[in-house]
Amino acid sequence: MKIKNICCIGAGYVGGPTMAVIAQKCPEINVTVVDINENRIAAWNDEDVENIPIYEPGLSAVVKEARGRNLFFSTDVEAAIDSADMIFISVNTPTKTYGIGKGMAADLKFIELCARQIARVSKNDKIVVEKSTLPVRTAEALKNILDNTGNGVNYQILSNPEFLAEGTAVDDLMNPDRVLIGGDINTEVGNEAVQALVDIYAHWIPREKILTTNVWSSELSKLTANAFLAQRVSSINAMSELCEKTGADVNEVAKAVGMDSRIGQKFLKSSVGFGGSCFQKDILNLVYIAKSFGLNEVADYWHQVIIMNDHQKKRFASNIVKTLFNTVSGKKIAFLGWAFKKDTNDTRESSAIYVADYLLNEQAEIVVYDPKVKREQVYADLDYLNSRSEDENRQRVRVVNDPYEACKGSHAVAVLTEWDEFENYDWQKIYDDMLKPAFLFDGRKLLERKKKEEIGFEFYAIGS
């Protein structure tokens, strides 16, 4: 089965980078990324490739090489579907905010809309690939829609979950730990579809790193991987609070524990909490699935990971209030970082949003600096929480383009993202321009405590 044309529905943090790399590595395949968001597509097509809507190290160079050759971005969804041999579905699957499963289950309305559009438009056989993170057995629902609402076209449904870490997405795509492809491996036509996708990735990925399974295992593996990673973050954050009470240093504890080869060092860095589009959403989805099968003990186990993460954010904000003499009313707090992690402009579920919300409810004034997050996004994040009016958010939160301006005249500085540039700032100047006593709250364990105390900061870092 030779693939000549690929369509990807969804030009976001998964679809855009993934298709760009596939186009770069497979120049004989035409790859079209479609989205109904005209502004997003226009940004992907901007003459200045540095203005593409997603910031990832190395991504602009990949897009520059392939765009216009065999990589295209378009709002003409139906034309791309019609001409495609293989269609990736890479649309958002947020947590439901309504109805049954509210606050836990994945909202699959965009997935269903894609399926119905594919069924309506398609005139020849297609391979449909789930790229979005989905609950186990979603492929069954997809196939049911496609087979019963279409034009008699035959479909093969594959699951190909992404395992990208934002900030390193391009490198993760170029050199993945593994590529997981789930399909109907018990039938000849199913195996052919799986092999067609294997052949695409095999352009640059060793075959031994491409793992094929049945669809259900592939779908559940994605949720499980994210749950395990988030669990490690919550585990070390739980220990960070105990370290603070006992005089231990969480960095030293993490190093000692991580040197055990059975455990390893990754995801053992304590912080103000994990964010991003996947961890919380996927764990809540896992909790909902477990509950739906009556596995309440399993659900409670994984739900505790979320509880610990929420506690860490609130604890960090509460420590700011308590340290600043139990009131931040009218006080200026500088936020260094708004993205949920360095090397990305993604702010979804960023700890900074929730810390800011807590402090704003205590009547603080906040000034934000982030090297990649735009002013409009900061306000959109706060407005989405619906804790205050939009006008109040804009009156009490300023977003600036200079870190020294953000910190000048502030009562405290809170480090919320681990941007490398923060380590190289003139912290003596920042201290000199702040109100005294000057407080520094390091939510990402980024800065050396001894050095900051020598400058004169009242210094607080998680777990030490």
Image (cartoon, rainbow, N blue to C red):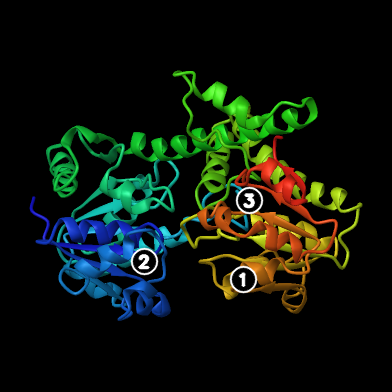
Dot 1: what SS? helix
Q: Which mark is residue 380?
A: 1
- Note whether residue 153 is visible: no
Q: Which mark is residue 11?
A: 2
Discs 3/2, front: 2
Evaluate if marks 3 and 1 touch, with contact meaning CB atoms under 8 Å apart: no
Q: Where residue 162 sits in the image (x, y, percent)?
A: 36, 47
Q: What separation in Å lies between label 3 and label 2 (alpha carbons)?
A: 25 Å
Q: Where residue 261 sits in the image (x, y, percent)?
A: 44, 19
- Which residue sits at x=79%, y=59%? 359
The disc labelled 2 sits on which kind of residue?
Ala
Q: What separation in Å lies between label 1 and label 2 (alpha carbons)?
A: 20 Å
Label located before the other in sequence (3 or 1)? 3
Q: Quadrant of residue 448?
A: top right
Dot 3: what SS? loop
Dot 2: what SS? loop
Q: Where residue 175 sits in the image (x, y, percent)?
A: 27, 43
- Mark 3, other Cα within 10 Å: few <14 / some 14–19 / many ≥20: some
Label located before the other in sequence (3 or 2)? 2
Label located before the other in sequence (1 or 2)? 2
According to the picture, the residue beneath numbered tag 3 turns out to be: 103
Of the pair 189 and 274, the residue shown nearer to us:
274
Q: Where residue 464 sits in the image (x, y, percent)?
A: 71, 35
- Which residue sits at x=16%, y=50%? 200
- Which residue sits at x=32%, y=53%? 170
Residue 136 lies, with reference to residue 365, above or below; the image says above
Of the pair 342 and 137, the residue shown nearer to us:
342
- Note whether residue 331 is visible: yes
Relative placement, left or right, of 453 versus 227 is: right
Residue 439 lies, with reference to residue 463, above or below; the image says below
